Image: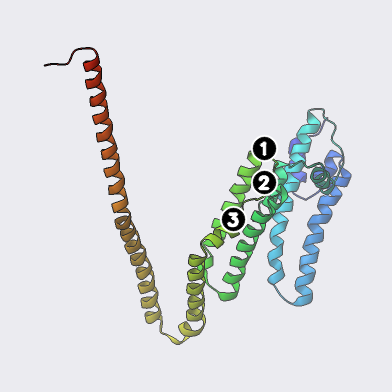
Amino acid sequence: MGKSKFTSFILSVFPGLGHFYLGLMNRGMVIMAVFFGWLGLVLLASVVTWSHDFLVLLVLLPIVWLYSLFDALQLCSRIQSGETVPDSSPIAELSESLANGYKSRFWALLFSIIPGAGHMYLGWQQRGLGLMTTFFLALFLMDWLRLSLFFFMLPVIWLYSFFDALQLVSANDTTVPESEGTLFPWLVARQRWVGLGLIALGVLIIFEREIVPHLSYQLISTIKTGLIAAIFIGGGVRLVMGSRLNLPVTEKVKTDTHLADDNNEVSTINDITGDERCNGKEKP
């Protein structure tokens, strides 16, 4: 009662202050400790190792900041409506919900910012592990091998993971089947194509790392153009040949359908003729 949502919003720019304003001291202290503790830990690791690679972990800070902002606004609305809000930390609430088997939509969407983490929270461990492994493996290969090929895969994997978790949590069904869906059976069922893809990837890596540095820019451009054109031509030929191979099957189905229709017509005519004979209406 008497708490301004606008003031809470302004103070929440500094993580934890919005909760202090609402009187939720424990919750604000935990959020502030997580935010600045993680910031100090990442900076310390970067200074000690003299490496900037750890700075990529700072991507978690905007997530904590957004959570603090929207959580303060939501709690302020509950307080304005006269509801009693317990001063419990977010970690305690998460532990309690996991212990009771309750899956929060908010936590699921928050974890889904990291591909696969939302699925793990919802109980889909295998699918979450597959998505997380695929995402970070593509990220590692893109950084290590300097291959822009994996760049387009990152947003695709992230968007698929996010909206798949959103669909699971929107179903309001917390039961997870014994044989939960995963990416690995799909790969096993198509292991021939996966093997061909890995071979092509290995050849591409050797070409990029060992051959490209010794070639001229014009020759490299010609090779890449020819390679892309060959892929499109090969895919088009495969689709055309596939449609031709399926054509006899289609014709056979159409022929069988026409024969069945003719047989039905003959049977109908015979039935009508028989009825006429039984009724004594047969012409001499």
Mark pair 3, 1: CA separation: 22 Å
Q: Secondary structure beneath disc 3? A: helix
Q: Secondary structure beneath disc 2? A: loop
Instruction: Answer yes or no: is residue 114 visible.
Output: no
Mark pair 3, 2: CA separation: 24 Å
Return the residue at label 1: 172
Instruction: Answer yes or no: is residue 122 visible.
Output: yes
Mark 3 Cα-neighbour bin, 10 Å: few <14, some 14–19, many ≥20: some
| Residue 279 occupies quadrant | top left
Q: Nearer the viewer, mark 3 or mark 1?
A: 1
Q: Earlier in the sequence, mark 3 or mark 1?
A: 3
Rendered location of residue 236, percent (x, y): 33, 62
Return the residue at label 2: 177
| Residue 86 occupies quadrant | top right
Return the residue at label 3: 158
Give the answer, above or below, for where 137 lies relative to 48: above
Give the answer, above or below, for where 264 lies relative to 9: above
